[in-house]
Image (cartoon, rainbow, N blue to C red):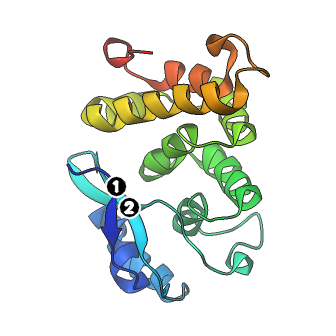
Amino acid sequence: MPANHAIDTAAPIYVPRAFPAAQSLHAADIARLIPDYPYRLWGYDVLLNGEQLEIPLRLYFPPELLAGPDDDTLLLCLGTRHHNGYLRQKCVTQLLERGDEFAVPYIVQLLGEYVVEIAQVINDALPNINVEPYRRFLADNPRYLATTQRRVISYWSCYYRTSYPDLKAYPPYIALLHLSPRQNFKL
């Protein structure tokens, strides 16, 4: 699978590609709520239970689409890709409580990003989640796992080394170690 690449900017095209086929009708409904973006969007490909998904890296849509505790799960997944970090944190908190397997790629992606507070939310949820879907996902996507591991180290080294002198105390490292298949963890 290729690394990050440009994706279609029309929500009716990129939203259904971001979810398993079983969610396609619902994803098409969600896509109608999201305005098209006039500039280039980037995404990455992963496998989830044998299906290729094209996950957007960063999205720009009105935050009002995510207004409350009963927000739609697919919309929450897309919210983890929103440009607003506070909104990403709100979305991942709700997703972790729900436990939908199609949310796994969205949750894992947050560990390879720069907002340590979001990784801490994931860490706090670890005792209450089933890690098997995460391990299966990461085992099926070894290149993605390797990239995420490199990002964890890079963000720690650039921005968090003074706050967390020991990499093993850094929240994204802890969560990725916990969620990764043991034979694939190379940090």
Specify the quadrant of the image occupied by residue 68: bottom right
Which label belongs to residue 43? 2
Instruction: Look at the numbered discs 2 and 1 and tell me whether their residues touch, using CB distance below 8 Å.
Output: yes
Which label belongs to residue 4? 1
Name which residue type carries label 2.
Gly
Q: Residue furthest front?
A: 158
Residue 138 in percent (x, y) is at: 35, 32
Q: CA distance from mark 2 to mark 1?
A: 5 Å
Specify the quadrant of the image occupied by residue 52: bottom left
User: In the picture shown, does residue 1 fall above or below 35?
Assistant: above
Left of 184 or right of it: where is 96? Answer: right
In the rendered image, the quadrant that contains the C terminus is top left
Mark 2: give few (<14), some (14-19) or many (20+) Cα within 10 Å.
many
Do we see residue 128 in this rendering?
no
Residue 182 in percent (x, y) is at: 38, 13
Q: Residue at x 28, y 35 (%)?
A: 143
Mark 1: give few (<14), some (14-19) or many (20+) Cα within 10 Å.
some
Q: Residue at x 60, y 33 (%)?
A: 155
Do we see residue 74 in this rendering?
yes
Left of 178 or right of it: where is 25? Answer: left
- For the residue pair 16 and 42, the one nearer the viewer reads as 42
- For the residue pair 126 and 161, the one nearer the viewer reads as 161
Which label belongs to residue 51? none
Q: Residue at x 37, y 67 (%)?
A: 23
Name which of mark 2 and mark 1 comes first in the sequence. 1
- For the residue pair 40 and 75, the one nearer the viewer reads as 40
Q: Residue at x 49, y 45 (%)?
A: 109
User: In the picture shown, does residue 72 fall above or below 49?
Assistant: below
